[in-house]
Amino acid sequence: MKKTALLFAILLLLNSCKNRPGKNAEKSSNSGEKKSAQKRVPTVSERKKTEPDFNKSDTLIKTSRPFVINGVKCYWKIALIVPPGDETGDRTLELKNLSTNKIILSNFDEQYDKHSFNTIDFENLNKDNLEDLNFDGYKDFKFFDKAASGTAGTYSSAYIFNSKKQSFEFIEDLSGYELTVNVKDKMLSTYGKNGAYWNLKKIHHFGKGGKIRYTEITKNEVISKDTKRFLKTTYERIVNDKIIKIKIDTNKLQ
């Protein structure tokens, strides 16, 4: 009986040891549970492959050959910044002094087509935009402004050469719609319109050294009185920024 009882106890002990999980098995099981419970975090290199870089933009740059304007040796530099996925971008045009690399003219344009970038002809750029706008003997620039242009007409920005500073300065008062130069009479005129009856014409009369002698402004507009409509014409003559003459005519519209 003692031998039988001892043998039975040994068998129970062996069976319990066989069914107990080992330490390695416990570690493997716990590790698997933790991995399945946690969401896998992608590495930095993996994120770079899948996430778009919103800060990255294409920058196109083009420069001209050196040339001389008003005795200054200079060159053009044009840069176009196009956001990812876009066909247009912001264009910056700079005229730089070749000796000092100083910017002597800067012009900005929005919504410039990147496919037109390589077709830029710097020789035509100078030919089409260079003109003595204030009759002082120096060449000036006038640039088409797409943002300002519209139903009122084609807007041109005027850049006048400053001989003392050896640079070009944007002059708003000489800029405007349908800019026209009358060399014979030394007049610079602009004309803008809005609809059939509203329009404004400005004529600058120049003297010696690029100085404005006087400016004429004629404005037409429609006004209403009771049930009737009238065309009001206002004429002003300006000398040294002061109105020295004003005349108003009102005519009934049919």
Image (cartoon, rainbow, N blue to C red):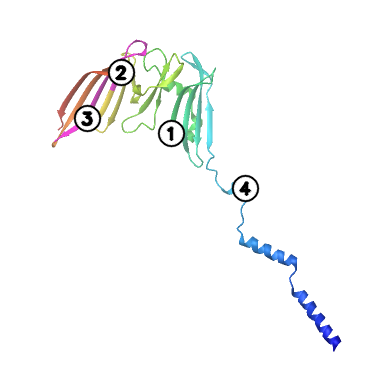
Which residue corresponds to the image point at 22% horizontal and 30% vertical from the top-left?
221
Q: Amino acid at mark 4?
A: Val
In the displayed structure, 32 sits above or below 83; it is below
N-term-proximal mark, 3 vs 4: 4
Q: x, y percentage for residue 90?
A: 46, 34
User: Which residue matches tag 4?
Assistant: 44
Q: Amino acid at mark 2?
A: His
For the residue carrying disc 2, how many other residues have a C-alpha within 10 Å: few (<14), some (14-19), or many (20+)?
Answer: many
Q: Is residue 124 left or right of residue 156?
A: right
- Cα–Cα gap, marks 3 and 4: 65 Å
Residue 221's mark? Answer: 3
Which residue corresponds to the image point at 37% horizontal and 26% vertical from the top-left?
156
- Cα–Cα gap, marks 2 and 1: 29 Å
Q: Is residue 147 left or right of residue 62?
A: left
N-term-proximal mark, 4 vs 1: 4
N-term-proximal mark, 2 vs 4: 4
N-term-proximal mark, 2 vs 1: 1
Question: Do the numbered discs 2 and 1 sit on residues whose CB atoms are within 8 Å?
Answer: no
Q: x, y percentage for residue 32?
A: 67, 63
The quarter of the rendered structure image containing the N terminus is bottom right
For the residue carrying disc 1, how many other residues have a C-alpha within 10 Å: few (<14), some (14-19), or many (20+)?
Answer: some
